Amino acid sequence: MPVGERDLKELDKRYIWHPFTQMREWLEGEPIVIERGEGNYLFDTEGRRYLDGVSSIWCNIHGHRRKEIDSALREQLERVAHSTLLGLSNIPSIELAERLVSIAPEGLTKVFYSDNGSTAVEVAIKMAFHYWRHKGQRRDRFVAFTASYHGDTIGSVSVGGIELFHGIYRPLLFPVYRAHYPYCYRCHLDKTYPGCSLACLEEVEGLLSCHHREVAAVIIEPLFQGASGMIVSPPGFLRGVRELCSRYGVLLIADEVATAFGRTGRMFACDHEGVRPDFLCLAKGLTGGYLPLAATLTTEEVFNAFLGDYSEFKTFFHGHTYTGNPLGCAAALANLRIFEEERVLERLGEKVEAFERALGSLKDLPHVGDVRHIGLVAGIELVRDRATKEPYPLEEKMGFKVCNIARQRGLLLRPLGNVIVLMPPLSITEKEVVWMVETVREAIEETTNRSPRSWR
Ligand SMILES: *Cc1c(COP(=O)(O)O)cnc(C)c1O
């Protein structure tokens, strides 16, 4: 029987194990099954239309079914869908590598492909570690930040710092030194004072001054931490971390899996502060949200350390089957061409201003503790008590409740705990931005009015 004639929701429940999902709840619920996309909208099997408010988990850039990307893929299909980079090369992967180097922060001249954000980070971790071995130094440690998220494979979970996701796996993980990421709304210091981010930098400096001889690299989500709740770091923090890495001779890994490709208003988050990392990890938005493709960019210095006679075995023994996949690379090239041809970054300013203006209207809601944003990304943190910043217990699922109401009104969102995330495609219009934030405001009002505690 063709799929269309069967009960898709029933089959989903019978066969699919969904990621980051309590499946008992899923089995009791009513799933939305997406059938097609068009521009900034997705349509489900019942014909309902939704604005894609989180870019299909942070990866769509120019909207769905962009004709330029669609036809680049069709043209590539006329040639070859896949061929390996192990011992061979292919045309789109060469062209894309050249393109990425030309737009990346200066000095990042070598491109290593993989499939997703987690593998892009694994590659950077292994390269950094191995680089120091080639230099004759044992550096087995990394410095990572509190509440960081770098993916779900074991290496990227090791540098990750979200207790709820990562804690249980600790026995499987390598140890890291941990510094506070400046989460200014909930500053870990007794009193918040201006220059709070300086205190976080001092902590990094403290770790590096003690341990720099054993630290291979510092890994950071530049400008904002994604999965821990869209935590935007204060200006200068990233540059400060870069300067400390340089001063102590430690490599810097910029995990731009979530921040790259215009999200922050510039092509890369590092561009805001003129920072050149030693590794740049790219994935989510690389193909415009079309196909799983990732890249880890690095420097001549790192690359050269791996050169030698075959018999020295200095080779980087790492590679994924679909590395440099021609279809993925063709989609990425088309994605970057749209940036250029439509001057997407230059035209983003007005949308960002409209977004900021609209977000301002959320700040007086009694259960909105913090509204943080950069570019076209925002995190709206709900709290039970604004004066004390007391959070809602996670069991109350306030974030999910708000997002469910938004869904009923045609806006697809996915929360992070008590934080409502907004990360629309860059192709969103000013009008849609205003509608999106207004819908979120209504959903928050409706949810928090229903919450029994607020009746007291
Ligand atoms: C999503 C994400 C990852 C992991 O990417 P996957 O493609 O899901 O493996 C890594 N780092 C950051 C900052 C991310 O947001």
Image (spheres, rainbow, N blue to C red):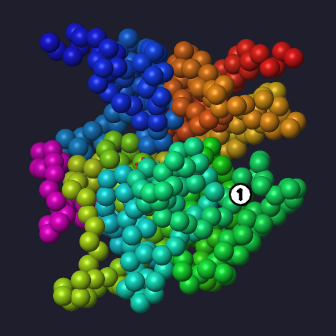
In the displayed structure, does residue 324 sit left or right of residue 391?
Answer: left
Span shown in magenta:
76-96
Vertical placement of residue 114 versus 410, above or below: below
Residue 295, percent from left and from top = 36, 60
> The residue under label 1 is which amino acid type?
Pro
* Magenta: main secondary structure: loop
Residue 404 counted in the magenta span: no
For residue 79, above or below residue 368: below
Residue lying at 27% horizontally and 50% vertically, measured from the top left: 328
Q: Quadrant of residue 215?
A: bottom right
Write down the residue under mark 1.
Answer: 182
Q: Quick one: 288 or 7, which is closer to the camera? A: 7
Under circle 1, the secondary element is loop
Question: How many C-alpha atoms fall within 10 Å of the one at disc 1: few (<14), some, or many (≥20)?
Answer: many
Membership of 87 in magenta stretch: yes
Q: In the rendering, at what x and y percent does residue 157 appear?
A: 48, 55
Q: Residue at x 86, y 56 (%)?
A: 190
At which x and y percent is residue 39? 41, 30
Residue 451 in the image: above or below residue 64: above
Q: Residue at x 63, y 57 (%)?
A: 146
